[in-house]
Structure formats: structure tokens, C-alpha cells
Image (cartoon, rainbow, N blue to C red):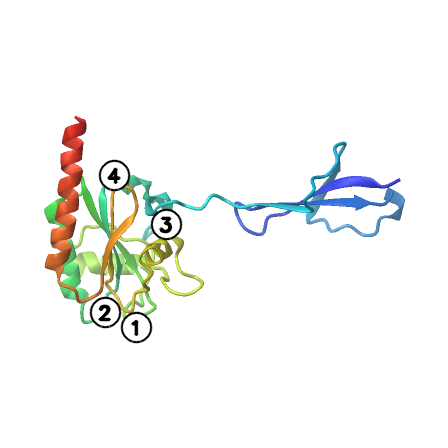
Amino acid sequence: MLSRWRIELQPLTDGIKLEAWLTLPPRGQWGTCNRAFSAAPLDDPPPEAFTQLVKPRKPKDFYSFEVKDAKGRTISLEKYRGKASLVVNVASYCQQTEANYKSLQELHRELGTSHFNVLAFPCGQFGDTETGTSRDIEAFAKSAYGVTFPFFSKIKIMGSEADPAFKFLTDSVKKIPKWNFWKFLVNPEGKVVRFWRTDEPMESIREEVTAMVREIILKKRVEL
């Protein structure tokens, strides 16, 4: 007598569940069984589909992601929801490092953290411009340029190993950074509204960010 069995496979990727429905001969006619899965007989008939794959929900905006900070701890970007964020792929040793770090820190200090943050993501994909560990990169930026904005773990922003949160930014604008210090402006809802390349003037960025922060403040006053 044939039996219907449901096979629950061990997931290869977090958040993905795979089920396979099989019809097997009587127990005495079984061959060896892979112990990587467990099986249980079913009273109900199997579904029409042989396999059912349930994928995890895709993050809908930048603040839906989790990332690692410079110390390797998992951080939810939800803590920045409701604020404007300027996300930057930074580097310690390129011609633009000093000017960008000073300008970014000035902007971060001027607009404050109540409504705005610069979020720094070190990247080592552009030559030898970022070779240290995440902790070393953060410590260098703080000691050399006095930065106080958040630093995250060193990531890749290009290729198949690109960090998912940063890939959301590049997919949103359909552009891949060609160098360090590209800047992506994220609104309070987590959507990318503008980006700037390395050498674009900081004054243009300041005007755009300031206008967004002003809108956030006015909205909060109205809600009060």
C-alpha cells in the first residue's frame, strides 16, 4: 500500500521554507533515507503543487533593513525612521576624504540628530582607499576629523555580495557608485529622493537636506 508523506527540508537560507510532497512504497521497500530531513505521514491529500516555496517578505524601504555597526552588532535602521538620512560610502585614504569628512560632520552638527543623521558605510572596493577593520576606520575618522555621526561595518556596495541595505539605495536610483563618498538622501519614510556623486558641491546637498529637515519640523508642529 502506498503512503503519502510530507518532507520538510532543512532550510539552506534563513527565512525560506521548503516543503516537498512524495508518495512512497511500504516501509519494507524503503532504501536509505537522508537524515537531513524529517518525514511525517498525512491523512489529507497533498496539494496540487509538488513543492511550495515561501520567501521572506522583501524590505519595502531603507529603514526596514538591519545592518552591522562598526563593532559587529546588529542594528535595525528603524531607529532612523521619521528622520532625514544622508547615507555615504566613506573611505579613509583618498583625495576627497578630508574635505568630505569635514563637510559631513559640519552638516551633521548643524542640523542635529533629532531630525537628521549622516550614516557612514565604509567600503574597500575602490583600490587601497579603505583597508582597515571597521573599528579602525571609525576610530581614525573620529580622531583625525572629529566626526560624531554613526559608522557601520565595512561593506561591499557592488557585485553579488553587495550589502542589501546599500543595494536598496543603488537600485532605487539605478546607479552604482564609481568612487567613494557618493551620497544618498533618504526621506523619513525610507525612500531615496536624491543622490550626489563624489565631487558635487556640498552646498547643493546642504540646501536639499535643510529643506527636508524644515518640512519634518513643520509637520511635527502641525501634528502637535
Q: Residues within 10 Å of mark 2 (few under 14, many from 20)?
A: some
**Residue at 88% over, 48% down:** 29
Q: Earlier in the sequence, mark 3 or mark 1?
A: 3
Q: Earlier in the sequence, mark 4 or mark 3?
A: 3
Q: Nearer the viewer, mark 4 or mark 3?
A: 4
Q: Position of residue 201 (x, y in %)?
A: 13, 63
Image height of 95 relative to 184, above or below: below
As measured in the structure, the alpha-carbon distance from the residue carrying label 4 to the one carrying label 3 is 18 Å
Q: Earlier in the sequence, mark 4 or mark 1?
A: 4
Name the disc covering residue 93, or none: 2
What amino acid is at disc 4? Gly
Q: Nearer the viewer, mark 4 or mark 1?
A: 4
Q: Residues within 10 Å of mark 3 (few under 14, many from 20)?
A: some
Q: Which residue is mark 1?
A: 128
As measured in the structure, the alpha-carbon distance from the residue carrying label 2 to the one carrying label 4 is 33 Å
What amino acid is at disc 2? Tyr
Q: Earlier in the sequence, mark 2 or mark 3?
A: 3
Q: How many numbered circles are shown?
A: 4
Q: Is residue 114 left or right of residue 164?
A: left
SS at mark 2 in the image: loop
As measured in the structure, the alpha-carbon distance from the residue carrying label 4 to the one carrying label 1 is 36 Å
As measured in the structure, the alpha-carbon distance from the residue carrying label 2 to the one carrying label 3 is 24 Å
Q: Toward which corner of the image does residue 189 lie, by quadrant?
A: top left
**Residue at 12% over, 53% down:** 206
Q: Which residue is mark 4?
A: 82
**Contact (Cβ within 8 Å) of mark 2 with mark 3:** no
Q: Earlier in the sequence, mark 1 or mark 2?
A: 2
Q: Nearer the viewer, mark 2 or mark 3?
A: 3
